[in-house]
Each structure stands twice: as structure tokens, then as C-alpha cells.
Amino acid sequence: MSFPAIQTVNQGGTYTGYGVPPGGDHAQGTQYGVWQREPGSQNYSNRSVSYSYTPEGDFEARVEITDTLHLTSANSFEGSATIQIFDADGNLVFTACATSTATRFE
């Protein structure tokens, strides 16, 4: 399944994103995190976290995403990620892998 997402990588190492997979809750897609340069040419990584709540407003889950990224040009990258979902008690309940491609928006 593929879907569009927005990522903002800020100078200084901070990151924000917004992405909701098909069938997901549009109010739950905001991600905050950090990025850093990795060894090798044009390699980077980022880690982000987002939180999910029930319709009643109760904390439901924490989502952590760990991405490895490789710049394929000055305006694009490819990446692979591990997605972990933890329930309200902090128990890991789901792990998935994902791939991404991105193009700079100006």
C-alpha cells in the first residue's frame, strides 16, 4: 500500500512529518523527531514518534519510526523504515517495515 506523506527536515537536526495510511485516522498522523548524518556518502537517519488517542480522548498508542535514508540527488531520497507500535502500557504490539521515495517540494 502506498500513500502520500509530508516530511520537513530542519537545519539543526529536527524533523516533523504527517502521513496517514489508507483507513487511518487523519487526526493521528503528526510525527516529531530528530535526524542525523550517517557514515557513507549521502546517508542519513531519523527517528520520530507520534501518539494515538481513542475517540473519547484516552491515550491509546505510541508509534515510533526509525528511518535510514539515502539521497539519490539534491532533491530526492529513498529510504527504508521500521515502524513499532506500543500500546498505552508501553508493550510492543506491532512491528512493520516500510520503504519510501521522496521529492523536494519548493
Image: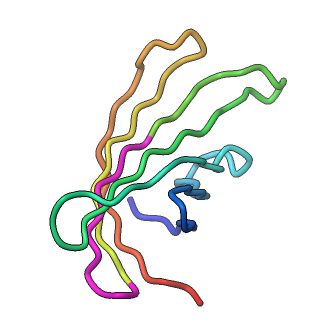
Q: Is residue 54 left or right of residue 91?
A: right
Q: Main secondary structure of the magenta part?
A: strand
Q: Who's the residue at 32% across and 39% down the image?
A: 96
Instruction: Give the x, y percent position of residue 45.
Output: 34, 55
Query: Relative to residue 89, is residue 60 depicted above or below?
Result: below
Q: Who's the residue at 61% across and 58% down the image?
A: 18
Quadrant where the N terminus sits is bottom left
Q: Residue placed farthest to the left in the image?
A: 40
Numbered range of the magenta stretch = 65-75
Q: Nearer the viewer, residue 84 or 9?
A: 9
Q: Nearer the viewer, residue 69 or 2?
A: 69
Q: Who's the residue at 41% across and 75% down the image?
A: 102
Query: Relative to residue 62, is residue 8 depicted above or below?
Result: below
Q: Residue placed farthest to the right in the image?
A: 56
Instruction: Give the x, y percent position of residue 94.
Output: 39, 27
Q: Is residue 31 magenta?
A: no
